[in-house]
């Protein structure tokens, strides 16, 4: 792969809902807990959705469990799935073809409602 360079694609502008918490592998669980507290207490939402992909799945589950412990009586609906991500590589030398790599990344969506 030293003769190829990854094609950088522009990120899709996904609309983020007010009641959605997107968990990343670099984020802290306490920040997600405080966001959930703000949604349930200050904004008076009846539900929230926690979404994560890849390495962030464990943090999403941990966050959901802590939120359920903090706010008694929440109901949980969990959806597991996978997303296919296509990476394209362009050659650095003449005579080589474009290479595409398809990865399957796990994703989770946890809906907590009162």
Image: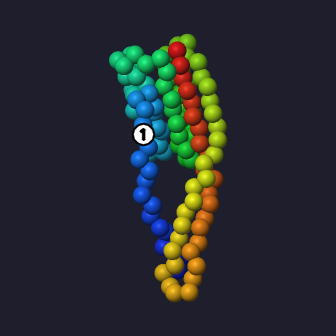
Does the rendering let one see residue 14?
yes
Task: Specify the quadrant of the image occupied by residue 87.
Answer: bottom right
Does the rendering let one see residue 28?
no
The number of callouts visible is: 1
Q: Is residue 94 above or below residue 59?
A: below
Residue drawn at point x = 46 percent, y = 31 percent: 20
Q: Position of residue 42 (x, y in %)?
A: 35, 17
Q: Is residue 28 above or below residue 76?
A: below
- In the current view of this chain or complex, which residue is farthest to the top? 73
Q: Is residue 73 above or below residue 26?
A: above
Task: Specify the quadrant of the image occupied by residue 77.
Answer: top right
- Dot 1 lies on which element? loop
Q: Position of residue 29 (x, y in %)?
A: 45, 34
Query: Which residue is label 1 attached to?
Result: 15
Task: Specify the quadrant of the image occupied by residue 81.
Answer: top right
Q: Is residue 104 left or right of residue 30?
A: right
Residue drawn at point x = 62 percent, y = 60 percent: 102
Seen from the viewer's position, the closer of residues 81 and 69 is 81
Q: Is residue 71 left or right of residue 86?
A: left
Residue drawn at point x = 53 percent, y = 71 percent: 89
Say how the picture is coloured: rainbow
Q: Is residue 78 left or right of residue 50?
A: right
Q: Position of residue 96 (x, y in %)?
A: 57, 82
Question: Crowdedness of circle 1 by 10 Å Cα count: few (<14), some, many (20+)?
Answer: few
Q: Position of residue 15 (x, y in %)?
A: 42, 39
- In the current view of this chain or complex, which residue is farthest to the bottom? 94
Q: In the picture, which quadrant includes the N terminus?
A: bottom right
């Amino acid at each position: 792969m030293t003769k190829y360079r990854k094609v950088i694609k522009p990120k899709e502008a996904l609309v983020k809902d007010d009641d959605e918490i997107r968990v990343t592998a670099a984020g802290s669980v306490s920040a997600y807990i405080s966001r959930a507290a703000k949604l349930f207490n200050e904004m008076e939402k009846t539900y929230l959705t926690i979404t994560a992909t890849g390495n962030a799945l464990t943090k999403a589950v941990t966050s959901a469990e802590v939120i359920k412990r903090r706010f008694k009586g929440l109901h949980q609906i969990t959806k597991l799935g996978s997303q296919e991500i296509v990476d394209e590589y362009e050659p650095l030398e003449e005579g080589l073809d474009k290479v595409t790599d398809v990865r399957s990344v796990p994703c989770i969506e946890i809906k907590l409602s009162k």
